[in-house]
Image (cartoon, rainbow, N blue to C red):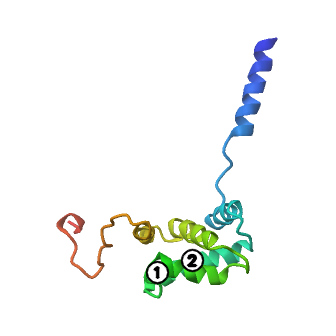
Amino acid sequence: MRGPILAVCIATAALTLAAPAHADADTDFANTLHAYGIYGQKDYNAWIGKIACKRLDRGLDADAYASAKFVSMQLPKGSTTEQAWQFVGLAIPTYCPDKQYVLQQAAGQPVAPPADPNQPAMPAEQAS
């Protein structure tokens, strides 16, 4: 009798502890922001994250410091500088992972410059 009860308990624990299915990126982003104490509408926060990436991509923000300043102006009054950096630190890998080098630069880590798309492809990158 203990065997079937133990099996049911193990199965129940496995189902209870299983990781939830991934939601969309915007929901995951909002949930992580909430863990940082950054609240607001999911769509608004995702929009700000995506705009921060576009600003980096288009050169409006030259670095992570400028991006954090932009984000801080969009967050609710009373938000901290730390929260602005947490927002940027989450937005970049979520919405523009190709820009992660700006976070590494802000942290003082050596970073190879991003590839220039106008340069000719290296032999290994050329289609055969």
Could you say which quadrant of the image residue 119 lies in? bottom left
Q: In the displayed image of the protein, which residue is found farthest to the top? A: 1
| Residue 127 position (above or below residue 13) | below
Secondary structure of residue under mark 2: helix
Q: Position of residue 3 (x, y in %)?
A: 76, 14
Q: Position of residue 128 (x, y in %)?
A: 20, 65
| Amino acid type, residue under disc 1 in the picture | Leu
Residue located at (69% from left, 59% from top): 35
Relative to 4, 114 lies left or right: left
Relative to 84, 96 lies left or right: left
Could you say which quadrant of the image residue 91 lies in? bottom right
Could you say which quadrant of the image residue 69 lies in? bottom right
Residue located at (60% from left, 79% from top): 71
Q: Position of residue 25 (x, y in %)?
A: 61, 64
Q: Position of residue 116 (x, y in %)?
A: 29, 78
Residue 97 circle label: none
- The residue under label 1 is 56
- The residue under label 2 is 50
* 66 and 11: which is toward the camera: 66
Residue located at (47% from left, 84% from top): 61
Distance between the alpha carbons at the discs numbered 2 and 1: 10 Å
| Amino acid type, residue under disc 2 in the picture | Lys
Relative to 84, 92 lies left or right: left
* 99 and 24: which is toward the camera: 99
Task: Name the front one of labels 2 and 1.
Answer: 1
Q: In the displayed image of the protein, which residue is found farthest to the left? A: 123
Q: Earlier in the sequence, mark 2 or mark 1?
A: 2
| Residue 88 position (above or below residue 62) | above
Mark 1: give few (<14), some (14-19) or many (20+) Cα within 10 Å: many
Secondary structure of residue under mark 1: helix
Image quarter in which the N terminus is found = top right
